Image: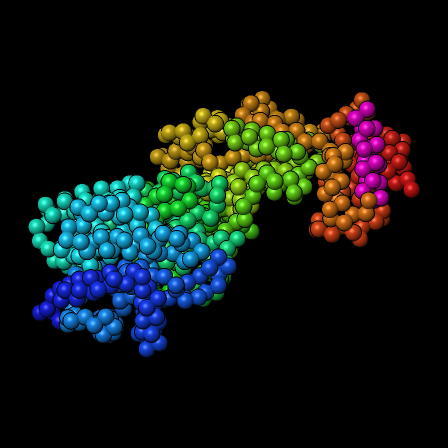
Amino acid sequence: MMNTSTQPGVRFSWQPFYTQLARTLAGYADRQQDLINFLDGLRAKGLPITPLQDKDEVGKRFLLREIDPFTFYGVFNRGITNENREGIAEEVKRFFGLPIEVPRDFTGLPILNNQQSWFFSYSAKRRPDDVPVLWRLFQMALEPDPFTVPDFGQTFDRALDVRGVNVNLTMGLFWIRPELFISLDSVMRAFASIKLPPSGLRFRNYLEILQGVRRRFPIPFTELSHKAWLAGQDESPTNERLTTPNGPSSFDLSIDYWLVGAYWDDREPKDQTDTFVKEGIWQNGYLDKFNELVNQMKVGDRIAIKAASTQRDGLPFDARGKTVSRNLIKATGTITRNHGDGRTVDVEWDPLPPEPRSWYFYTGRATVWRLRKDDDFAQRLIQFVFLNQPQDYEYFAAKWWDEDAGAVPEVEADTAADPVAPALIEGGPEAPPYSVDTAIDEGVFLSRDEFGQALERLESKRNIIVEGPPGVGKTFVAEKLAYALMEAADWRRVTKVQFHPSYSYEDFVRGFRPTNVAAQFDLVDGPFLHACQAAAVQPDLRHVLIIDEINRANTSQVFGELLMLLETDKRDMKPGITLLYPRSKAERFAVPRNLFVIGTMNRADRSLALVDYALRRRFAFIALSPRFGDPAFRKWLSGRGMPDDLIQHVIHRMNALNATIEEDRQLGREYQIGHSFFCPRGDDFSGLTVEWYRRIVETEIIPLLEEYWYGLPEKVDSASAALLAV
């Protein structure tokens, strides 16, 4: 951001004033309270100065107790009018007794983002030496030749490590010594084709940049700064351009574009956007998630904070009565340094718009989302977020809802607005974190080792089948494995389908379906392709497809030519294969590496064949068994208030029944009855009695026994009597 002259015939009159002020201000390192009181007085006079309220660990606000000289300059070198800037300069002249005229033009002067005008963070995150090191650098910079001052480079680098400081430090140095220092703000970087080093700016890099700029532009830095600002007004892109389906794109193909979250469950306020913008950073709120992705963020990449939601009313287009997913774009910026810790990047945030902008349809809930530059939807999103171009609502509405659009698959009516997959539908704050311990607390009744081994098999094989007798919680465990794999209880990244005997390839993958028009059929994608498309859109996030009762269908026929693609070493296979019903001759398909498949199988169902060998060798199998004898089962029921005598009644009777079933030559262990029949919903079981137990036995257990011992009523009667005995 740059200021222009209020009087076109006068240029750079700010330079002598700023230089004189710097030499006077340098003596106030031990009089910081005087500076704070002066600024507080300006606020009382109604002048628009930098906020002066600090914040401690619990969020309590109080007046600043320390301030650095660069932040003092930032009071009037930010996004305010030149009239207000002159008014503050008049007060500054009076306070310091400066023997120099107040500037009437600010040509070539780079200014700060209003929301990021401090050079340090709140006291809760501020180190004791942060403000002092900024004073030391400020004073060193005023020496006749600061580049020869011992430790100047070391102090420069230490100042860069202050939370809230990045390339804005070079702007501050330019304010006080524009004949020596160049500002590396985004406008100057774009004009002079300056690339920040991948590891972030350091003093040695700054010296190299200074030398290179002097060779290429033999004019004063103030004039160069003004030229950069003028060039920026032309908005003539110099980056490599990409032709997209909706016209030429001017975004830079050499960088990545990131949408990130700023919602932290364990902080107040939970939305950290204002804090991030103020401190010039973005931080991953998880200690052990998304670290690899964050480490892939590069200096120069563009980043935006988004918030996920849905909207039904007040939309700027005809939504046909539907609820539409939305991303609220709250801040945009440029990454200037990656700390390499998997959590923190420094960001040069752009000035915030008066109101966040809303983007609809193609949205993402992931905390970290790298946009694909080769995807039409993502290209349009990049142009909207980072180039301030409007969204073509009609284009997206047609893709999402029009029957003849063709490019985007339809979704079943009960899955919501987003046709790519439920995984991309918005629904509030970020999904809560999920771990092995969470699953155990929720009642999977597996030990930590057992659950961890199942999770390891899922991660390595990518396809598993959870098998066991009825009632052992196969589907429940499958869902918890999915959440633990994703490390988030995010149902939007889980696609569920249930197989049945008449289920076909056309239902599962793709097939022709009749339309409302007589004798016309549309090619419609099934849940498997929906899940693959959702995973492909978010390649850095894990997605899961859960197939309930996978052996109830003819699996070879349902999967068809896709069986081979499920194998780990065939994922993302290039160029892919041609589907049975391709949409075009050029279409190729491969299963994404980040899609995991979990099937469930009840081996006690005599009407079903076992899974055939072709599918079996591509899946790992996890066997579950009844857990009535597991102390975790008793603890789980007891922890929710179930009376001890009722718990003992359930455990004793069901263990006895399962022993009988296991000893039966016609049945065996695979037909034992699981514990989930006696795991009611809710968190308070204190009101349950033996009558509750009897109802379950009479309506669920005995009908199952009648199926097991069909034609053997005496066995059913004997087992029932034992279950219901007082």
**Quick check: can you spot residue 520?**
no
Magenta stretch, residue numbers: 645-663
Name the spot of residue 339 as percent of width and height, x first: 36, 43
Q: Is residue 723 magenta?
A: no
Residue at 15% from the left image edge and 63% from the top image edge: 15
- The image quadrant that residue 720 belongs to is top right
Residue in front for this viewpoint, 564 or 363: 363
As drawn, 652 above or below 461: below
Name the spot of residue 398 as percent of width and height, x first: 40, 54
Q: Main secondary structure of the magenta part?
A: helix
Farthest right residue in view: 726
Residue at 89% from the left image edge and 33% from the top image edge: 718
Residue in front for this viewpoint, 599 or 272: 272
Name the spot of residue 240 as percent of width and height, x first: 22, 44
Q: How is the image coloured?
A: rainbow
As drawn, 372 above or below 76: above
Q: Is residue 661 magenta?
A: yes
> Which quadrant, please, contains the C terminus?
top right
Q: Is residue 473 left or right of residue 481?
A: right
Q: How many marks?
A: 0
Residue at 83% from the left image edge and 36% from the top image edge: 652
> Which quadrant, please, contains the N terminus?
bottom left
Name the spot of residue 449 as percent of width and height, x first: 62, 31
Q: Is residue 524 left or right of residue 347?
A: right
Residue at 12% from the left image edge and 58% from the top image edge: 223
Q: Is residue 374 left or right of residue 319?
A: left
**Quick check: can you spot residue 583?**
yes
Q: Is residue 679 left or right of residue 649?
A: left
- The image quadrant that residue 619 belongs to is top right
